[in-house]
Amino acid sequence: MEIKGGKCVVFSAPSGAGKTTIVHRLIEKIPSLSFSISACSREARPNEKNGVDYYFLSIDEFKSKIKNNEFIEWEEVYLNNFYGTLSYEIEKIWNENQNVIFDVDVVGGINLKKYFGKKALSIFVKPPSIKILEERLRARKTESEEKIKIRIQKATDEMRRAKEFDYILENNDLNLAVKEIQEVVLKFLASK
Ligand code: 5GP
């Protein structure tokens, strides 16, 4: 199969659905995929690096980039936590003849699909249930109890928007989910 650059694959899901793990696995398996590093205004977690996981910006820096039209899309995903896709980042990846893989929230995913149209494949990662989602968020131990509650409320609303995506991937078993979506993504990248 010949895979050229210039396309994008967008992964969205409620927080804790396993989307980031799936995205990392796909990057290992499909070398023509490059991760779109988003900008965000939250603090880096201990295991995260600036310019690798995100471009970590202050709220003021983020707002000035909004003003300068540097984003394809941006969202205040949580109060005072801004996240956005930089146009520059996508140009850079496409110039290297690579395809872009995104890890964004549900509204961001819908907006990116609208923006890129047929060049994009949008995938919604569906957790087995909200209860399991809550357990996964707790096990991750990166968020406070209050933040977990906020993420669960948001997840409940986001589940209703799954049908607006090109593909719904049920993540009941991580290895099976990766195998399933790898085939779908390869087919999309090879299509004209
Ligand atoms: P986290 O704080 O857990 O890294 O990310 C919170 C949420 O923001 C996740 O759903 C993540 O996918 C999303 N996110 C990350 N980057 C972007 C972006 O550039 N745009 C949008 N809309 N959401 C993003």
Image (spheres, grey):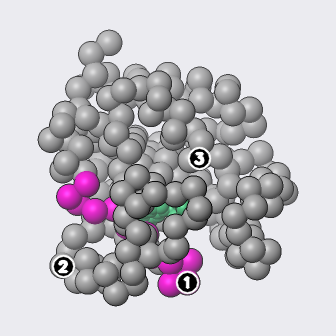
Earlier-in-chain disc, 1 versus 3: 3
> Who's the residue at 28% across and 62% down the image?
86
Can see residue 138? yes
Would you say the beta carbon of the disc 3 residue lies within 8 angstroms of ligand 1? yes
Q: Secondary structure at mark 3?
A: helix
Q: Which mark is residue 87?
A: none
In the rendered view, tell whether residue 78 sits above or below residue 114.
Answer: below
**Label 2 environment density (alpha carbons within 10 Å; few <14, some 14–19, many ≥20):** few
**Label 1 environment density (alpha carbons within 10 Å; few <14, some 14–19, many ≥20):** few
Q: Secondary structure at mark 1?
A: loop
Amino acid type at circle 3 is Lys
Would you say the beta carbon of the disc 1 residue lies within 8 angstroms of ligand 1? no
Amino acid type at circle 1 is Leu
Name the residue carrying label 1. 79
In this picture, residue 161 sits left or right of residue 146? left
> Who's the residue at 22% across and 70% down the image?
70
